Amino acid sequence: MPDKKSKDYVSGETKSNFNDRKKFQPYQEPQFNQLFTDGTLPVEANRYRLIWSRHCPWANRLAIAIDLLGLDDVISKGVVDPLRPAGVVGDWFFTLDDNDEDPVLHTKSLSESYLKADPNYTLRTTVPALVDVKTGKVVNNNYNTLIDEFSIAWKQYQSETAPDLYPEELREDIDALNKIIYTDVNTAVNEAGLARSQVDYEKYYNRVFNRLDWLEERLSKQRYLFGSTITDTDIRLYVTLARFDVVFYQKYYVNKKTAS
């Protein structure tokens, strides 16, 4: 029933306003994409907070990158509860924190930061979301650009031992392989699980395992996808592989082989 309204959620002054909308859609384009690299966003310590969920591979990749780069002292992280109130499908809540409130943003739900950025926002709230602590507004929720933004623009705050996740000499090759992994691994596992016909299921099933065989051959000769040092691409692949056996193999029936 795609047009059924979801349940109202009220907690204190927080009310979920994502009810007059269609229910969950498989994909939604990121709606906020302000950048550091073009000077739109100032690079400032303790100015931003990454809101993420541990269950989500798209959000998990950003949390990993922040830690690898040593930016966890200057970009804080807040975690939403992966379990939402019954019937609420368009929002995320800070029910893992004391008083059900994010301790930095002092909000009950992620939608509050989306609505501060755009009072007319009616789409789903998604993680990851980078929030400007000063304004409380979401400034970027694009999981495809943020790792590279942190890698390039935040070098002054990175640790001395931080890897270069997006080295200039490899950027064209990284971008190309990222697109392949996005299509054939990151999203193909979901497409197989959401398939509504045997033909579609087999198409994505085969796409996943053909690409994994190709990647395994590449990694049999080197530790990382681009040699001896980790890059953005390794993180993008890892977050899917880490969930493969416990989620995709069992729940989505992408079960030709396990990842372990």
Image (cartoon, rainbow, N blue to C red):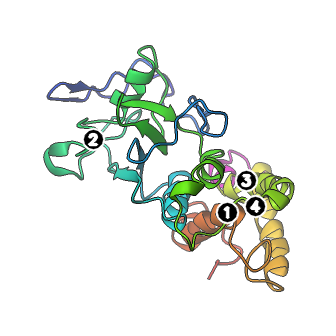
- Identify which residue, 143 or 260, lies in the foreground: 143
Disc sitting over residue 167 in the figure: 4
- The residue that disc 1 covers is 165
- The residue that disc 2 covers is 85
User: Which residue occupies 85% across, 80% down?
Assistant: 217
> Could you tell me how many numbered marks the image carries?
4
Q: How many angstroms separate mark 1 from mark 4 (CA)?
A: 6 Å
Q: Mark 1: which secondary structure?
A: loop
Q: How many angstroms separate mark 3 from mark 1 (CA)?
A: 17 Å
Q: Quadrant of the C terminus?
A: bottom right
- The residue that disc 3 covers is 182
Residue 114, percent across and down? Answer: 42, 28
Residue segment shown in magenta: 190-198
- Identify which residue, 127 or 78, lies in the foreground: 78
Q: Residue flagged by tag 2: what amino acid is it? A: Pro
Q: Residue flagged by tag 4: what amino acid is it? A: Pro
- Identify which residue, 146 or 240, lies in the foreground: 146
Q: Residue flagged by tag 1: what amino acid is it? A: Leu
Disc 2 packing (10 Å; few <14; some 14–19; many ≥20): some
Disc 3 packing (10 Å; few <14; some 14–19; many ≥20): some
Q: Is residue 211 above or below residue 103?
A: below
